[in-house]
Amino acid sequence: MNGHQRVRDDEGSGSRLLALSDGVFAIAMTLLALDITLPSGLGTAGFEQALADVMPNLWAYGLSFVVISAFWRGHHQIFRYAREVDGAVIRIGLLNLGLIALMPFPTTLLAEYGDQPASVAVYSGAVAAMGAAQLALTVVVWKRPWLGSEALPDPVARNDVADMAWTVLVFVVAVPLAFVSPTGAKLWWVVLIPLKAMTGLRGKRLRMAAQRSDV
């Protein structure tokens, strides 16, 4: 490698991977809503009971929609700097998309069997796996500045890595915790809110500082 130049492996346009990613994210979000249905021809009592029964599906849908949206936003931030991709980026990117596409399954488990330890553990493990794949993608793009028109600033990259690492850590811890208390594991997820808020604000400041330095 000479500076930021090197022989590229399976090089291609990052926009193609980004377009595929947008499609997978959109389909996964859409599939989340398929379980939210009510039978037709219900009387008043039956309708009220069916509406109560579907509320866990709505809750699980809302949770997974927020989770997938956060991953989609982070994915776009990664490819803000990567204009091209190589073999490593493609492989990790496809793994990430495969995990995203699988999310409707653990979401259904959480909606239908939210009081079962295995369901909460599977959901937590699925989110942790998505986070690990996106964390790996962030690091790979960060360490390959020759793929972009500009390098990902180190402070921004470190903050992005920390942000995704918190996601992985919280959901990994929730896996064994689910077998002790499924409710406790779901409450543990809330710990991620202030952590993400902290790294999100720091990331915004770092990106603004990087933009000012480029002017």
Image (cartoon, rainbow, N blue to C red):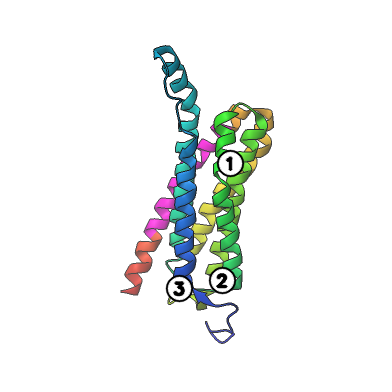
Q: What's the amino acid at mark 3?
A: Arg
Q: CA distance from mark 1 to mark 2?
A: 33 Å
Mark 2–mark 3 distance (CA, rounded to whole Å): 14 Å
Residue at figure coordinates x 35%, y 71% from the top left: 213
Counting from the top left corner in percent of width and height, residue 180 is at: 68, 29
Residue 153 seen in the figure: no
Q: Quadrant of residue 15?
A: bottom left
Q: Earlier in the sequence, mark 1 or mark 2?
A: 1
Q: Give the main secondary structure, helix, strand or loop, of the magenta stretch.
A: helix
Q: Amino acid at mark 1?
A: Phe
Counting from the top left corner in percent of width and height, residue 39 is at: 46, 25
- Pointer 2 residue: 143
Q: Amino acid at mark 2?
A: Lys
**Which numbered disc flags the more N-terminal residue, 2 or 3?**
3
Q: Secondary structure at mark 2?
A: loop
What residue span does the magenta drawing correspond to? 186-205
Identify the residue at image location x=54%, y=42%. Answer: 104
Q: Looking at the image, which is closer to me, 196 or 155?
A: 196
Q: Nearer the viewer, residue 130 or 3?
A: 130
Count residues near mark 2 (Cα–Cα under 10 Å), then give few for <14, some for 14-19, many for 20+: some
Q: Earlier in the sequence, mark 3 or mark 1?
A: 3
Determine whether the residue tagged by mark 1 lies in a helix, strand or loop. helix
Q: Nearer the viewer, mark 2 or mark 3?
A: 3
- 3D distance between C-alphas at marks 3 and 1: 32 Å
Badge 3 is on which residue? Answer: 83
Image quadrant for the C terminus? bottom left
Q: Which mark is residue 105?
A: 1
For label 3, count other residues whose C-alpha is less than 10 Å away and answer few (under 14), some (14-19) or many (20+): some
Query: Residue 37, labelled with which disc?
Result: none
Which residue lies at the image location 63% right of the left edge and 43% below the top edge?
125
> Disc 2, disc 3: CB below 8 Å?
no
Q: Nearer the viewer, residue 210 or 183?
A: 183
